[in-house]
Image: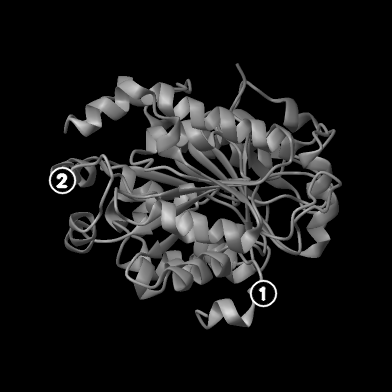
C-alpha cells in the first residue's frame, strides 16, 4: 500500500496560508512531548509563516529547547548570502527564538556539494540514532515544502539523477534546473518522506499551471514527495487549479458535517444552513440502528462497537451524494477524531462545522429540550468523550452562544460563501 492521498486545503491568500501553516505546525509540536524535529524549506512562500512564528502569539507556545530545526535543501553559497535558505529562516525567526544548538544548517564551506551532503547525512544520522530509517519512527515531525515552476521539491529536479536516489539521505546537486543556477545540496525523497506531516505551501497565480499538472498525477518530484503518514497541500485562491471537475463556487465543499455534543444545536443550525444553501439536510441520528436508540433511551452510553456501523452508514451516504454531485449537510456528534476520520476520510471537499459551547450553556439547553432520547445525565460523558477538532482537520468553528442566523452567517463567512439571503430573512420577518 502506498502513502495516503494528500489533503488539499484552500485558503484565501498568503496571509491566511501563513496562519494556517503556523497553526498546523503548533498542533504537531503539541502532539510530541519529547524531542521535536522540523525540516524547513527555502523560497518566498514560507517566509511569512516564519515571521509569524516570531510573533508573541506563536513564539510563546513553542517549547524552543525541545525543537530542532533542519533544512530540506540548501544552495551552495556561503552562509549569510542572500540566496542561502537557512539564512532567510534565521533572519525571519530562528536567531531571535531558537537556541543556537538546535539550529542545524547544511554546511556550505566544505569545498563541494557532495562533501556537504555527506556531512549533513552524518549529522542527521547522529540526531536520529540509526543509519536506517524506520517507518514507525519518522525522522521529522513536520517537513515543509514548496513546489518549483518545473515541479521540483527541495533541490530534486525532474529528470535529474538525485530524484531516483533511495539509498542515501542527502545528495549533492551539481547543477540546478531553474534559477538561481547554483549547485545545491538536498535531502532525498526517502528522507523527506520520513515525517509525520509533510506540508506543502503553494501560493500565487504563477503556481497554478504546475499545481494542475501535479494534481493530475504527472510524474514529477512534487507528486512523488509524500509523507508515509500525512501530506497536506495549503493552496491559496490564486494557485487553486480551475478544473472541469471543480464546478463548485470557491471554498464550497460537497458535504458539511455539523458536529458537537448533544443540544449544541446541530440539527437547528444544519437545517438553517441547508435552507440558505439550498442543500439537503439529514440528521445523523436517523442513521442509528434501533438497538443504539434503545440503549440511549435507557440512559446507556454507546460503545465504539455500537458506533462504527452508524458512522459507516453516514460515510456511505456522503460518498453516494458526492458521486452523484448532490451536496448534503449531516448533523452528527462526531465527538472523536477517529469517528471523524471515518466520516471525512481523505476528502478535502467534506468539511466539519464544529458548534462550540461550554458545559454550563449546553447543559441548560439540554434541560429545556423535549422529545429527545438523550437524557441530561449523559452530557458529562459526551464532554468527556469530546475531542475538539484540531487545526489539521480544518474545521469551521463557531460559538453556539449566538442566534441561529448569526451562527449561519459566521459559517458562510468562514467558508468564503457570499451572504445573499433575502432582506426579510435577515430581519427575521
* Mark 2, residue position: 380
Q: Position of residue 207 (x, y in %)?
A: 79, 57
As drawn, is 302 to the left or to the right of 285?
left
Q: Are marks 1 and 2 in contact (CB under 8 Å)?
A: no
**How many marks overall?**
2
- Secondary structure under tag 1 reads loop
* Mark 1, residue position: 420
**Label 1: few (<14), some (14–19) or many (≥20) C-alpha neighbours in 10 Å:** few
Whichever of callouts 1 and 2 sits on the residue coming sooner in the sequence is 2
In front of the other: 354 or 362:
362
In front of the other: 412 or 173:
412
Q: Position of residue 399 (x, y in %)?
A: 36, 66
Is residue 193 at least partly visible in the picture? yes
- Secondary structure under tag 2 reads helix
Q: Position of residue 195 (x, y in %)?
A: 49, 35
User: What whole-number distance in Å separates the C-alpha atoms at marks 1 and 2?
Assistant: 39 Å
Q: Position of residue 376 (x, y in %)?
A: 16, 47
As drawn, is 218 to the left or to the right of 83?
right
**Is 425 located above or below residue 342 in the figure?**
below
Amino acid at each position: 500500500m502506498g502513502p495516503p492521498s494528500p489533503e488539499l486545503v484552500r485558503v484565501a491568500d498568503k496571509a491566511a496560508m501563513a496562519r494556517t501553516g503556523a497553526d498546523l505546525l503548533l498542533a504537531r509540536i503539541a502532539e510530541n512531548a519529547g524531542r521535536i524535529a522540523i525540516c524547513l524549506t527555502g523560497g518566498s512562500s514560507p517566509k511569512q509563516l516564519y515571521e509569524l512564528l516570531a510573533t508573541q502569539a506563536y513564539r510563546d507556545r513553542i517549547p524552543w529547547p525541545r525543537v530542532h530545526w533542519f533544512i530540506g535543501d540548501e544552495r551552495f553559497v556561503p552562509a549569510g548570502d542572500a540566496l542561502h535558505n537557512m539564512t532567510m529562516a534565521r533572519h525571519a525567526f530562528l536567531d531571535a527564538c531558537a537556541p543556537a544548538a538546535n539550529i542545524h544548517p547544511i554546511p556550505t564551506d566544505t569545498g563541494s556539494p557532495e562533501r556537504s551532503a555527506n556531512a549533513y547525512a552524518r549529522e542527521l544520522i547522529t540526531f536520529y540514532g540509526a543509519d536506517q530509517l524506520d517507518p514507525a519512527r519518522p525522522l521529522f515531525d513536520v517537513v515543509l515544502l514548496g513546489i518549483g515552476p518545473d515541479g521540483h521539491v527541495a533541490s530534486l529536479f525532474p529528470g535529474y539523477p538525485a530524484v531516483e536516489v533511495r539509498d542515501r539521505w542527502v545528495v549533492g546537486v551539481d547543477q540546478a534546473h531553474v534559477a538561481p543556477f547554483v549547485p545545491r545540496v538536498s535531502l532525498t525523497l526517502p528522507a523527506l518522506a520520513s515525517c509525520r506531516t509533510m506540508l506543502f505551501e503553494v501560493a500565487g497565480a504563477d503556481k497554478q499551471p504546475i499545481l494542475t499538472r501535479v494534481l493530475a498525477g504527472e510524474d514529477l518530484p512534487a507528486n512523488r514527495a509524500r509523507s508515509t503518514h500525512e501530506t497536506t497541500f495549503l493552496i491559496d485562491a490564486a494557485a487553486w487549479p480551475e478544473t472541469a471537475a471543480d464546478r463548485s463556487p470557491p471554498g464550497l465543499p460537497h458535504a458539511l458535517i455539523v458536529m458537537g455534543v448533544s443540544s449544541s444545536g446541530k440539527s437547528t443550525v444544519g437545517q438553517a444552513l441547508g435552507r440558505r444553501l439550498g442543500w439537503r439536510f439529514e440528521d445523523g441520528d436517523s442513521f442509528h440502528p434501533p438497538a443504539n436508540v434503545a440503549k440511549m433511551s435507557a440512559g446507556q452510553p454507546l460503545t465504539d462497537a455500537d458506533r462504527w456501523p452508524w458512522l459507516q452508514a453516514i460515510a456511505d451516504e456522503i460518498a453516494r451524494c458526492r458521486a452523484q454531485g448532490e451536496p448534503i449537510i449531516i448533523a452528527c456528534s462526531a465527538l472523536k477524531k477517529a469517528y471523524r476520520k471515518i466520516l471525512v476520510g481523505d476528502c478535502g471537499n467534506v468539511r466539519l462545522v464544529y458548534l462550540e459551547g461550554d458545559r454550563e450553556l449546553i447543559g441548560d439547553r439540554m434541560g429545556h429540550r423535549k422529545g429527545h432520547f438523550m437524557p441530561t445525565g449523559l452530557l458529562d460523558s459526551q464532554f468527556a468523550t469530546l475531542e475538539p477538532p484540531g487545526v489539521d482537520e480544518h474545521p469551521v468553528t463557531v460559538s453556539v452562544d449566538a442566534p441561529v442566523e448569526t451562527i449561519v452567517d459566521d459559517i458562510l463567512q468562514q467558508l468564503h460563501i457570499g451572504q445573499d439571503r433575502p432582506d426579510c430573512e435577515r430581519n427575521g420577518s
